């Protein structure tokens, strides 16, 4: 099967290696972990790429050195005890899941995420081995699954997220945790069906949900979600200062979006969203960067395609999440299910429309790139960090690029002791400031 072949194929060993070789120079400002999560079935078999057991690959940088590489499976209850859906009480078992999609930091916890279940905490303190510490359900307050794409407000430190799914309503619940990590809001939202809601949007004043026509059907073989354009497509706007208030729904053309780049308020009555948009959900359908402008006064959405490059895994400097960010970054070459040459990272100037590009060369495919800041100025200088697979040698590198000069040669390249399979999302996790 394609999702078990080439660089989609899992690796079988957990390794630890120290003092990695470096071509170029690791910026001395970088002290912490680059962590990236992805599916890696422990028995080397899974029915779909999305279902493999989560494995976190981490490179630790410190003092201008590539100190170590580690890869560790996330020890979920599914990994240790086998696949199950129901617990002993017959209820949906939210500890059971792959934890294979993202890894984020909030309130001192590093969480491995998948949208079908609870998060799992992993230990990435200096000197530790990325061990799984256990399931995290916010002290028992979380009673739904948690999206793999939570948003941290850079102003308040709050973590905004949602859970979707279930056989019966409510199919969607909005959650908010405060800066200390306490879950303080859980609000059900009425939607007509169980759709695959992978991501959402946060601005300084709003939360925006995407209710799109990829609909669950338990009788559908394999992947239980399928394209049903007759369901319709709409965006739901909720005011952050009124979290239990009205959700206002604005219709858009049927489409699908896995990943949002960023969003911001534009005055009192407009919201601007950037997304990697698919015309429909299906194999070999490309995604392109689009802008949606929501006019709250008229209740309409203007939809614009901004570029004709196939792009996925969009990111910004996370210190500008929910605020206007001039620059965004995306990967070109790796789709959700197929690799497409040539592999590149793109830098979008969202003000001028200019696109800068870093090509990695024949057979070299990057994954999602995380932004690591160089100083304390949001939107200022920094680096893009990613794993790059080389099909000619069947090896992988950690690559560091200058985010302000993305077309230049890499700042640093770190050959890794084993191949890193294609995966999903990760982050630069800086060491705590002492």
Image (spheres, rainbow, N blue to C red):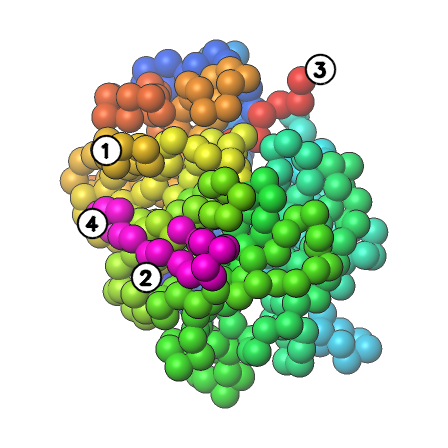
Q: Which residues are magenta?
A: 293-310
Neighbours of disc 4 within 10 Å: few (<14), some (14-19), many (20+): few
Where disc 2 sits, the SS reads strand
373 relative position to 179: left or right: left
Q: Is residue 129 visible?
A: no
Q: Earlier in the sequence, mark 4 or mark 3?
A: 4
Q: How would you rate the neighbour count of disc 1 (Cα within 10 Å): few for under 14, some for 14-19, many for 20 or more?
A: few
Sequence order check: which comes first, mark 2 or mark 4? 2
Which numbered tag is attached to residue 308?
Answer: 4
Above or below, comparing residue 149 to residue 59 in the picture: below
| Cα–Cα gap, marks 1 and 2 | 22 Å
Q: Which mark is residue 330?
A: none
- Residue underneath mark 1: 354
Asked if the stretch drawn in magenta spans residue 34, the answer is: no
Give residue 182's position: percent from left, percent from top: 79, 45
Q: Nearer the viewer, residue 205 or 154?
A: 205
Of label 1 and label 3, which has the lower sequence position? 1
Q: Which residue is mark 2?
A: 278
Measure the C-alpha gap from mark 4 to mark 1. 12 Å
Q: Quadrant of residue 128?
A: top right
Alpha-carbon span between mark 2 and mark 4: 12 Å
Name the element at disc 3: loop
Q: What residue is disc 3 on?
A: 434
Taking the view exactly as shown, the residue that stands out farthest to the left is 362
In the image, taking residue 217 as reference, residue 403 lies left or right, namely left
Q: Are marks 2 and 4 in contact (CB under 8 Å)?
A: no
Gap between marks 4 and 3 measured at Cα: 45 Å
Please state which of the two labelled residues, at mark 1 or mark 3, is closer to the viewer.
1
| Mark in the foreground, 1 or 2 | 1
């Amino acid at each position: 099967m394609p999702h078990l072949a080439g660089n989609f194929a899992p690796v079988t060993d957990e390794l630890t290696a120290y003092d990695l070789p470096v071509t170029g120079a690791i910026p001395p400002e970088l002290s912490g972990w680059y962590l990236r999560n992805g599916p890696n079935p422990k028995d080397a078999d899974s029915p779909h790429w999305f279902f493999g057991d989560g494995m976190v690959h981490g490179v630790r940088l410190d003092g201008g050195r590539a100190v170590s590489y580690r890869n560790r499976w996330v020890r979920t209850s599914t990994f240790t005890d086998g696949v199950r859906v129901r617990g002993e009480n017959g209820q949906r078992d939210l500890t059971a899941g792959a934890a294979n999609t993202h890894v984020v930091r909030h309130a001192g916890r590093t969480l491995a995420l998948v949208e079908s279940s609870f998060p799992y905490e992993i230990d990435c303190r200096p000197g530790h081995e990325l061990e799984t510490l256990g399931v995290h359900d916010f002290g028992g307050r979380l009673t739904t699954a948690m999206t793999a794409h939570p948003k941290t407000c850079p102003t308040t430190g709050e973590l905004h997220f949602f859970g979707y799914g279930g056989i019966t309503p409510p199919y969607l619940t909005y959650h908010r945790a405060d800066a200390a990590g306490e879950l303080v809001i859980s609000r059900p939202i009425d939607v007509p069906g169980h759709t695959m809601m992978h991501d959402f949007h946060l601005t300084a004043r709003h939360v925006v949900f995407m209710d799109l026509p990829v609909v669950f059907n338990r009788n559908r073989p394999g992947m239980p979600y399928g394209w049903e354009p007759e369901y319709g497509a709409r965006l739901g706007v909720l005011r952050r200062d009124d979290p239990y208030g009205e959700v206002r729904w604005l219709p858009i053309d049927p489409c699908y979006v896995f990943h949002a780049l960023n969003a911001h308020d534009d005055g009192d009555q407009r919201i601007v969203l950037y997304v990697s948009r698919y015309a429909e959900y299906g194999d070999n359908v490309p995604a392109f960067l689009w802008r949606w402008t929501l006019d709250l006064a008229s209740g309409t959405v203007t939809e614009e395609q901004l570029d004709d490059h196939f792009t996925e895994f969009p990111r910004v400097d996370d210190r500008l999440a929910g605020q206007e960010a001039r620059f965004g970054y995306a990967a070109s070459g790796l789709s959700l299910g197929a690799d497409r040459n040539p592999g590149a990272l793109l830098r979008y100037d969202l003000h001028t429309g200019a696109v800068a590009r870093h090509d990695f060369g024949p057979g070299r495919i990057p994954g999602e790139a995380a932004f690591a800041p160089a100083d304390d100025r949001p939107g200022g200088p920094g680096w893009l960090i990613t794993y790059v697979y080389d099909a000619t040698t069947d090896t992988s590198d950690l690559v560091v690029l200058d985010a302000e000069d993305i077309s230049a040669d890499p700042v640093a390249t770190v050959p890794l002791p084993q191949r890193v399979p294609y995966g999903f999302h990760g982050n630069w996790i800086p060491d705590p400031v002492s």
